[in-house]
Amino acid sequence: MHMKKLHILPSLMSVFALTSLVLTASCGNAPATGNEVTVTPAVTAALSPGADSSDEPPPPSATPSPSATPPPAAGIFTPESAALEVRGFLDSGHYEVSLVSDDLSIDSEDYYTFLISLKGSAIEPLVLVNKKDGSLKCILADNTVQDITAHPLYHDAGSAVISWNGTYTVMGEDGTLRSYIMMEQTDDGHFEFTAYSYLAHAVEELSGVAQISGDEASFTGDTGAALNFSWSGSNLVLDHKHPTQQANLSGIYTYTEDQDSKVVTVTPQEVLDRLSRLDAAQTGLAGTMSDYLYYMPDDITIMNDRLCYNVLVYSNEENRLYYQAQLFVTLDGGTVYCQGKTSDDIQIFSLQ
């Protein structure tokens, strides 16, 4: 059913009220002389046909005039004050807070709905602010409501200890690894980092030395790429600018202990040395791996959500090279994914 709200002008409200008074007086016990009804001069002026037309209220129109949204009552949060409540649990000024809706009602409680974003990228879930008391909640994509502590940016004030060390990741909605950064602090003012971001199986790498300034840090590369590091609780916030708009590292990164096994611990040469000592039967090849030649492109590849060195294997037959297999070796040098030249099947074995 479609319902339309009619806005009644104040002047019309006065006429309706006065008419009601007249009818009440006609039907009730008001003092009267004969058939006349005694009314006040103000009522007579408003209803008398002889009154000046400029004093008469305008006739009702078919289309109600739009009326401004009334200001919130005393003690009720405005959209602006509600937005401040949202910003209150964010400890970084890089976020944007946008009002999505101002008329959501749940269980007889009225809420504002806000979206938090970072450089145009939405950070779900949406945040609800109670119009009466300013309390915060989350509303998920399936319309279920949870406590604000379920929001990934929520943190207990003062609970986070800043450390420019460790491995941080951003996972996609499907649970796959989207971005990855490793940091190691070298002194009080600097830390080294290596960051990866990828679309499908193409990996972009950015590394360098960032300069620490309080609870933030920054890096500008030779090609113009710039990274700003800040914190929201225990989450690392990256703001990435690149003049050529390549893969973007911007996002909210979470420290994950089990990701430490993916840290680079072997060099490309160490990978080749380990492969040369491997039994070739594990890869479906003949002989030993020392019988083959290897080529390692500079790019790093994603395999099973692991960052891997890419190794192409060739056999040497009568001074001619023949492609045999492609190996993906994890950066810690512990696992090998092998894809043969005649099959898409992936074999997995260990180098440890």
Image (cartoon, rainbow, N blue to C red):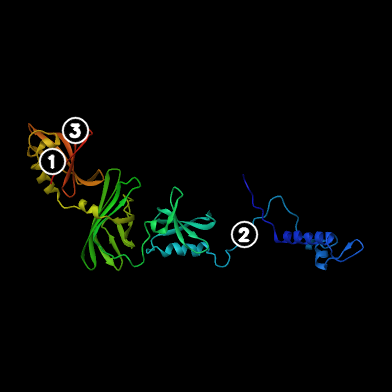
Q: Secondary structure at mark 3?
A: loop
Earlier in the chain: of badge 2 and badge 3, it is 2
Identify residue for label 1.
Answer: 294
Q: For the residues marked 3 and 1, what is the alpha-carbon distance in whole angstroms?
A: 15 Å
Q: Secondary structure at mark 1?
A: strand
Secondary element at image label 2: loop
Where's the N terminus, which quadrant? Answer: top right
Label 2 CA crowd tier, 10 Å (few <14, some 14–19, many 20+): few
Foreground residue, 220 or 163?
163
Disc 2/disc 3 C-alpha distance (Å) = 71 Å
Position of 348 relative to 71 (above/below) = above
Q: Are marks 2 and 3 in contact (CB under 8 Å)?
A: no
Residue behind mark 2: 68
Residue type marked 2: Ala
Q: Residue at x 15, y 34 (%)?
A: 324
At label 3, counting other C-alpha atoms closer than 10 Å, the crowd grade (few under 14, some 14-19, many 20 or more) is few
Classify residue 195 by image quadrant. Answer: bottom left
Q: Residues within 10 Å of mark 1 (few under 14, many from 20)?
A: some
The extreme right residue here reads: 34
Residue 144 placed where, x, y %? 45, 50
Could you tell me which residue is drawn at 50 percent across and 60 percent down?
130
Q: Label 2 vs label 1: CA separation?
A: 74 Å
Q: Percent from the top left, x then y, of residue 232?
A: 35, 62
29 with respect to 338 (left or right): right
The spot of residue 219 in percent (x, y) is 28, 61
Toward which corner of the image does residue 345 lie, by quadrant? top left
